[in-house]
Image (spheres, rainbow, N blue to C red):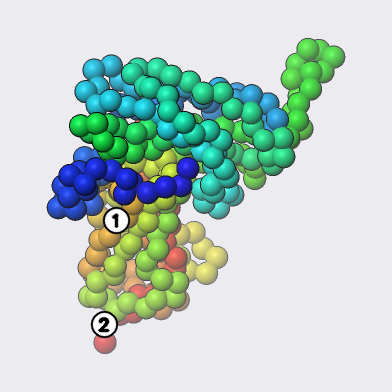
Amino acid sequence: MKFSIATASALLLTAIATVSADEYASAMKQWCGGLSVPTPDGVAPLTAGGQAHISVHNNPGDSHEKTITGLDLYSVAADGTAKYIKNVWKGEQALTTDASIDDTVPSDTAAGQYYYRVWVTNQVNGMHGPDCLQTSHTFKVTTGSHTNAAGLTEYAENLDDESLYNPQHAKGCFGLTVENPQEGQVFKEGEHARITIKRESSSQTDELKKVDLYKKVKDSEAVFVQNAWEDVEDIGDAFTLKDHIIIPAEHIDPEAEYFYKVEASSNKDKDAVCDFVSKSFKIQAKN
């Protein structure tokens, strides 16, 4: 279900238009913060052609009337890009505290990591209010399985193969891109670098924690230069900040390439540290 939140009530949209992006993200947490998708739980693998049980939970005491209106299947590519596969269910199912939907994983599904995204619609004075988008844990899909002579289940793929099943993606660390600075961009010391972070709507990253500057010379290990920003902010769909490039003289190196490392949290694993890096750029000393 790839429709817009533009279906929200006119009154709500007017209110949304008057707030900033971070205020909007915080407001949506008021509407959607009590929702979770406990299963699939990301522990047990699913098999192409097999059954998936998707359960949806809403914290008791929610004053907003909620209805499940859609269920989408997504994959997570090796590069951490979330890809919409298909809508697997649409309709109306009331949600008070708990509800569930069963789905058959398409038989032609390739081995890899997947997750479900649930659409939950709020009612505002009898009208269609904001849609909440909540996802399941990322789970492994294998192309086949069988029970061996010892009574144990064997799978067609190695479930420990990190090229298929990335452990960071399993924690919810995907769907975030550092779009700026651009590859090969050149800054002079003292200038401001614009750092633009884009979050996909189906990403499981949650809050932005810090941005650090690193440098790398040829094949050597990357070296921490300094912290550019540190706080706790809702990312929303995008986040932009400016870094005033003033760094110690020993870190100015014409042979070096620089990059920013962005740290974010996950809404699926409270202990996860999600790192994303920018493209490489240059820093020149002042004339």
Q: Are marks 1 and 2 in contact (CB under 8 Å)?
A: no
Q: Is residue 71 left or right of residue 145?
A: left
Amino acid type at circle 1 is Phe
User: Residue 228's mark?
Assistant: none
- Quarter of the figure with the C terminus: bottom left
> Is residue 24 placed above or below 39 in the rendered structure?
below
Amino acid type at circle 2 is Lys
Q: Callout 2 environment at 10 Å: few (<14), some (14 to 19), or many (20+)?
A: few
- Image position, residue 251 (x, y; %): 34, 69
Task: Name the residue: 26% across, 82% down.
Answer: 286
Instruction: Name the secondary structure under disc 1.
Output: strand
- Image position, residue 1 (x, y; %): 47, 42
- Image position, residue 159 (x, y; %): 67, 32
Count of numbered circles in the view: 2
Task: Name the residue: 39% across, 76% down.
Answer: 185
> Which residue is the site of mark 1?
239
Q: Is residue 127 left or right of residue 273?
A: left
- Distance from Cα at disc 1 to Cα at disc 2: 29 Å
> Which residue is the site of mark 2?
286
> Is residue 214 placed above or below 11 in the rendered structure?
below
Task: Name the residue: 28% across, 16% down.
Answer: 60
Residue 234 in view in this figure = yes
Q: Callout 1 environment at 10 Å: few (<14), some (14 to 19), or many (20+)?
A: some
Residue 31 in view in this figure = no
Task: Name the residue: 29% across, 56% down.
Answer: 239
> Is residue 11 placed above or below 283 in the rendered structure?
above
